[in-house]
Image (tube, rainbow, N blue to C red):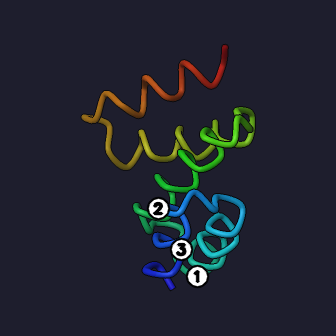
Amino acid sequence: MLKKANTLYVQKKYSSAIKYYAKILADDSTNFPAVANTATAYFEMQKFSQSIPFFEKAITMDSNNPWWYNYLSQSYQ
């Protein structure tokens, strides 16, 4: 399922990808690729308020990556 979600993400079919990521996260809330890609998909769709909880979770899972902080700060603007 992750492969299908990622394919949709790469094709910029973000809404469809998010649906797959949601199914993945319902089974495994610690699936980092699904968390990170959900965050960035919402961001790319300019649904910033929806991206925030996923960026926050990505930070808790990968706190050494400055991109998550950058995206999160932009989401609040």
Q: Where is residue 67, by image quadrant? A: top left
Q: Say which residue label 1 marks.
A: 27
* Element type where label 1 sits in the image: helix
**In this rendering, is residue 21 above or below 2?**
above
Quadrant in the picture for the C terminus: top right
Q: In this view, does 62 lie to the left or right of 2?
A: left
Q: Earlier in the sequence, mark 3 or mark 1?
A: 3
Tell me the tag on residue 10: 2
Q: Where is residue 43, by image quadrant? A: top right
The residue positioned 73% from the left and 42% from the top of the image is 50
Image x and y of residue 64, in percent: 25, 34
**In this rendering, is residue 32 above or below 1?**
above
How far apart are labels 3 and 2 at the CA level?
A: 9 Å
Image x and y of residue 39, in percent: 56, 47
Q: Is residue 69 left or right of residue 50?
A: left
Image x and y of residue 19, in percent: 70, 71
Give the residue type that dot 1 points to. Asp
The residue positioned 42% from the left and 39% from the top of the image is 59
The residue positioned 64% from the left and 58% from the top of the image is 14
Give the residue type that dot 3 points to. Ala
Q: Say which residue label 3 marks.
A: 5
Q: Which of marks 3 and 2 is nearer the N terminus?
A: 3
How far apart are labels 2 and 1 at the CA level?
A: 23 Å
The crowd level at tag 2 (other Cα within 10 Å; few <14, some 14-19, many 20+) is few
**In this rendering, is residue 74 above or below 57?**
above
